[in-house]
Image (spheres, coloured by chain):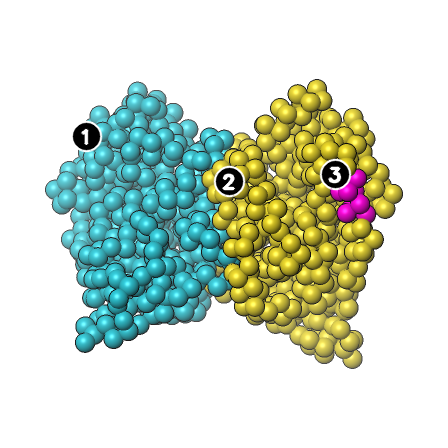
Chain colours: A yellow, B cyan
Amino acid sequence: MAETNSILIKDTTILSDEIKKSSILVVDDTIQEISTSLNKNDAEKVIDGTNKITMPGLINTHSHVAMTLLRGVGDDQSLQTWLEDYIWPKESNLDEELVYWGSKLAMAEMIKTGTTTFNDMYFYMEETAKAVDESGMRAVLGYGMIDLFDEEKMKSELKESEKLIKKCHNTCDNRVTVAVTPHAPNTCSEELLIKSNELASKNDLKLHIHVSETKKEVEDIKNNTGKTPFEYLDSIGVLNSNTVAAHGVWPTSNEMDIIKEKGVSIAHNPSSNMKLASGIAPVTEYLDKGINVGIGTDGVSSNNNLDMFSEMKLTAFLQKVNTLNPQVLPTKDTFAMATKNGAKALGINAGSLREGKLADIVIVDTLVPHMTPVRDALSNIIYSSLGSDVDTVICNGKILLENKVLKTINEQEVIQEVNERAFEL
Amino acid sequence: MAETNSILIKDTTILSDEIKKSSILVVDDTIQEISTSLNKNDAEKVIDGTNKITMPGLINTHSHVAMTLLRGVGDDQSLQTWLEDYIWPKESNLDEELVYWGSKLAMAEMIKTGTTTFNDMYFYMEETAKAVDESGMRAVLGYGMIDLFDEEKMKSELKESEKLIKKCHNTCDNRVTVAVTPHAPNTCSEELLIKSNELASKNDLKLHIHVSETKKEVEDIKNNTGKTPFEYLDSIGVLNSNTVAAHGVWPTSNEMDIIKEKGVSIAHNPSSNMKLASGIAPVTEYLDKGINVGIGTDGVSSNNNLDMFSEMKLTAFLQKVNTLNPQVLPTKDTFAMATKNGAKALGINAGSLREGKLADIVIVDTLVPHMTPVRDALSNIIYSSLGSDVDTVICNGKILLENKVLKTINEQEVIQEVNERAFEL
């Protein structure tokens, strides 16, 4: 007899560590069985997986989701101008309600394009947590601390982080964990960075930080500390296997060794690095060294969407053209970055479809012109698909999207709320 | 009273040379009027344009559409290996029926992602013309001539081109024109190139050719002729304002001057150039010099889809990161490349929404999460949209897609036919 809270995805093309035709049984929040002998009586709910590719939910390792509110702000500007003249002035007008609706809109977009987990750094994060609770997604959330070398600010920023940890860590059936998130080594004082690390260690949390995004940042940090960004962070004891460093565009060879030795994960953001002209991260070299690299979208105004399918294609393309070698970043490596490498970076038991893993699953339609024919499901996912091909999304064993319809978010309400509020900023 | 064969797109955001709210009246194949005072009695068919962006149909300036059959063949290989070991052996098994179905599948994909015109070079082109006739698209079609320096082959290739001109030029209500399309300066003899040019001149046709795609091609041509590719073509009189040169990745400064002086148009293919690791075309420099540059997808197996929205985003991103200058390729320049520059390259009276222009029009839905909010319709189209946001497509005054449903192609039939046939190759 079927177990309660069970879902069967029947006769599908499973794309994970290998490609195979089989069926998947989900019970509660877990993948209980993968087998060709499962049948429709084994679950309460049966999803027909024929002509569909079933894969792990995508993991966005670097985001600022409420920035959907700022979509289209400050296009075609450099990071510094974009931040100082466009983004920061508008962000100073943010409030709880705006962040709630901006986060909810982002979740509508992420679910519809196959993302089940995101790693976020922003403000009013309790509101983002509330939206995660309602949407059914999985997230690592951090309050983005910036003290700009002001001691009072440092103290109040740390308090905000501590408050978020108390309020939100391990909530929403453990779908939400909290990370400590100092913004960057050139916007945070040394003391803030050190205390952030202490706070993360004490609570066994991830530490998520921007590092080595632009040449200018590298120069500024060199001028201030005599060290390159990763060297500096390492010298004050901040780097370890709980660190997720976003960007990592300009590492020296010595910094690569440090990243490897300390077990730091890199969150690579190809769209953002291209749009802001920050540079091309040496992803191929990172992977060759055995460094764990995930993929992120960054915030919407440096992208300008949250489609992880586009980011996968771009990750592969950018490395190929930059090295003039079409063989680098073959499809399986790119796919691993967006799935199991992301899970490793964030410390979650997901990112591949195996018995015992959390049931974070995405089902993609193949009976559309641009996915025809399917010679190789992996190739079609990386190079041919659009985020909008996602048909069904399951996170933590719950269905969040079915036949392309959101089940936990009222899509038109969210669109209307954001359209009414975003222009206040 | 409403004229027959008329369509009114009412109260929409028009995105063309400028952005404005207005209505568009199409009569027969032409945009007759753009005015805020048009009302629903002015046309037989009325389309509600509120919450939608209405823009020119996208123009794909370099394609091999029947290569949809080869989707997923030879991923992650260099151009030479990809061609010689993967593509050419399979192409030798092509026949009329396969090309017909492959072309039809491509048209389903192109229409659904907002392309109304494509510039194609391939084999069995009468079959592609037949599919254009049925689909209602606009196309420039050429038989891809390759003689590999064999004189008999040269003669038979030219005969094929002449046959295609007689049979298909200015057919399908003038939606189809024929171009002369020698494959490339390193796969065609000098005599074939010269005779191609004579054939094009005599019939006032476009000449569409691959030029300067890879470093290897440049080296090979230098070794054979002592000249770089554009210098060589110019020395034999082949370059003029009817030339569409696909790729143009590795031009010297002298070649840029030749391209400008002769009025050659460049078809830029960012996905293909990145996937095959061919290199990064100097699009910014081309545009700075006043050279006309359009955008193309190239064939599906070096992409692997035909989504011109992705190509626009990629065009902008690649130039920004390559020059480390986020201000290059601002949205209006990228948009012009995919619309009016393409129309100029192909010599068609389309590419912008103005009275008297051909009615090739695309309507994009904005009430979706990833297009919310719309601060700037142009920014959302270039950076946020997915090809699947296209709601309605009009080509030559006929509706080809409505509410995302193809009106001239039986989508599931085409998918099934290709799935049954593609694996024969």
For the N terminus of chain A, give its image quadrant. Answer: bottom right
**Residue at 52% in and 51% down:** A71
Q: Is residue A51 left or right of residue B163?
A: right
Q: Which residue is mark 2?
A: A275
Q: Which residue is mark 1?
A: B237
Q: Is mark 1 in CB contact (under 8 Å) with mark 3?
A: no
Q: Is residue B263 left or right of residue B53?
A: left
Q: Is residue A421 left or right of residue A33?
A: left
The residue furthest left is B202
Residue B403, position as x, y percentages in the image = 41, 69
**Residue at 47% in and 32% down:** B325
Find residue B97 and report its image quarter: bottom left
Residue B121 lies in the magenta stretch: no
Q: Chain of mark 3?
A: A
User: How far, Cα to Cα, is label 1 from label 3?
Assistant: 70 Å
Q: Which residues are magenta?
A: A154-162
Q: How many C-alpha atoms fall within 10 Å of the one at disc 2: few (<14), some, or many (≥20)?
A: many
Q: Chain of mark 1?
A: B
Q: Which mark is residue A60?
A: none
Residue A369, position as x, y percentages in the image = 44, 61
In the image, what residue type sits under mark 3? Lys
User: How far, Cα to Cα, is label 2 from label 3?
Assistant: 31 Å
Residue A161 lies in the magenta stretch: yes
Q: Is residue B17 left or right of residue A297?
A: left
Which type of secondary structure does the marked residue at label 1 adopt? loop
Q: Chain of mark 2?
A: A
Question: Same subunit under labels 2 and 3?
Answer: yes
Which type of secondary structure does the marked residue at label 2 adopt? helix
